[in-house]
Amino acid sequence: MRGVLGVKVAVISLFPEMFDAVSRHGVSGRAFEDGLIELRLYNPRNYAVEPHKCVDARPYGGGPGMVMMAEPLDRALVEAKDWMGSTDHRVVYMSPQGKVLKQEQFMSFASCEGFILIAGRYEGVDERFIEHSVDEEWSIGDYVLSGGELPAMVVLDALIRNLPGALGHAKSAHEGSFSQGLLGHPQYTRPDSISGERVPKVLLSGNHEQIRLWRLKCSLKRTIDRRPELLEAAVLDSEKKALLEAMSKDLEVKC
């Protein structure tokens, strides 16, 4: 069962003000307003006992930069867990060393009760905190950012899009790129002609079955052209396999 106000997410971050970007704007902002998700932010500085509220120190063994101390994070985590009020949640450290997230995982996350996201900074977090307090490490890609706040916001936004009632159209979350293991099809809107370039005729035909097939064919073609590794991993039904076979004989497929 979810919390009273929906999915609960706690974030431990040195820069909690950054999360206004997802909690107050757009689709994600409306989800917060509608009670589909509840966010609580915990700043480790508020749990530091030193006079200067120190949360970082030099790494043992030498090296550049600073490392976030375990003790302020531990204290913040205790309070976050108390707010969650349930053991059915995951403690996640956002890290470039973590498992790279995929769309299908976010679809399954929507049924979870909640998450506690740890946004690291500097050269990282004391390994003892990760070993004793973190359930999983997640990454949004193979690159390094200045901190875990942006990855945590990406996780929040992707999670919210899969919550029932978050999007204006119920099918939106299931028809975009990656939702079926493929890239999405091209989209067009008014006017129907721009500098002589017109919208594909099939989209103006009113024939829903032809439109569906055109979109599926374009989705397959884009995946082949741009992300062929996705197609290799996708589970294709008989219709998609037949379209792929036909497309291999027709090199002039236009989308």
Image: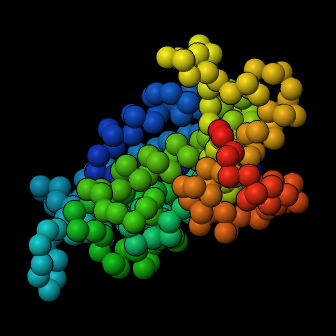
**Does residue 46 appear left or right of residue 225 in this picture?**
left
**Does residue 112 appear left or right of residue 24 in this picture?**
right
> Which one is nearer the viewer's eye here, 201 or 137?
201
Q: Where residue 192 appears, x then y in whole percent?
A: 62, 16
> Which one is nearer the viewer's eye here, 57 or 74?
57
> Which one is nearer the viewer's eye here, 21 or 142?
142
Q: Where residue 141 appears, x then y in whole percent?
A: 43, 61
The answer to whether one can see residue 146 in this image is yes
Quadrant location, the C terminus = top right
Q: Quadrant of residue 226?
A: bottom right
63 lies above or below 82: below
Q: Where residue 32 appears, x then y in whole percent?
A: 55, 32
Residue drawn at x 67%, y 46% is 252
Q: Residue furthest top?
A: 191
> Which one is nearer the viewer's eye here, 86 or 116?
116
178 lies above or below 124: above
**Does residue 121 appear left or right of residue 228 in this picture?**
left
Residue drawn at x 17%, y 60% is 54
Residue drawn at x 64%, y 23% is 199
